[in-house]
Amino acid sequence: MGNIVFGGCSYTWGQSLWYHGNFPNDNHPKDGFFYGDMICPECKEYMIKNRFATQVAEYFDKEPKVKALNGGSNMEILRFCEESVDINTELIIIQTTHLLRDKGFSINQQIESFENFVLKMEAKNIPVRFIHWMFTDMDYEEYELIKNDNWFGSYFKENNFYSKIIRDRTIFLDGDFNFWKWTELGAAMKYYNKIKYSEIEKRTIVGYFGHPKGAEHRDSHFSIYGHNIVAESIINYIKENGLLK
């Protein structure tokens, strides 16, 4: 059986997706963080079965290859992809994460590493495609939404790089280049009209379930609804572009 390699951070791994299973022995805190020893076996099984990587792979009758552990920087994501490719790999999907997570590599180094990996894989006839949480290749409208944010604004203002290789191989998710407009609900509220926003917010755990009392942080990871939309967007792209037999 052929396989699809899915590189990504907690959004690809499926953080918090198991909340939809409502398992009685689920004692994992609902704060968006990862506590590996507190994820019940049923929770993990539910997560693996329902995350977008599994949905996409099963649709095309392929094996999904996803990093066993949650999270990671872009360079860790890239290393996983490099180590996971084998003779049965037919496609690689990379979900890029925040470019400041890896202090050991500049943004230019990360982008160049992705570009070199794409060219290396394509020389072996293995296509590489991207989806993005908050890649720096933004348009003016996107930047205007977050320019005053202490974290996002300064990050994008100083580091708005452009990569034709990456942009040309990016899968737009429900029309969006970056899915941070889904996960950062403050920006989503500004970007979408009220009708669209009411649908967008359900794509995250906090938007679907609400913010639990006493939780310090809100959980912006994909809900099952969000995973379904990501899977649908990737499946349609693969079909329209004939990437898999």
Image (tube, grey):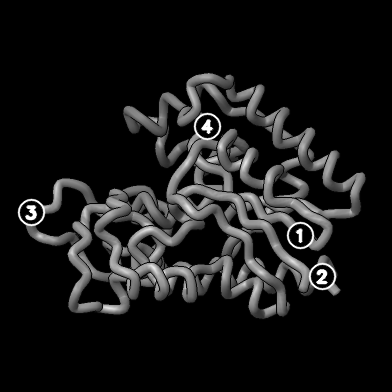
Q: How far apart are marks 2 and 1 (CA)?
A: 8 Å
Mark closer to the observer (3, 1): 1
**Picture residue at 87% right of the left edge, 47% below the top:** 122
Residue 243 appears at what percent x and percent y? 82, 66
Q: Residues within 10 Å of mark 4 (few under 14, many from 20)?
A: many
Whether residue 85 is situated above or below residue 57 in the rendered picture = above
The numbered dot on residue 244 is: 2
Asked if residue 194 can be seen in this view, the reply is no
Mark before the other along the chain sequence, 2 or 4: 4
Q: Position of residue 121 (x, y in %)?
A: 83, 46
Q: Mark 3 points at which residue?
A: 214
Q: How far apart are marks 4 and 3 (CA)?
A: 30 Å
Front label number (4 vs 1) = 1
Residue position marked by numbered label 1 in the rendering? 91
Mark number displayed over residue 99: 4
Residue that appears at 21% across and 47% down: 217
Give the residue furthest to the left. Answer: 214
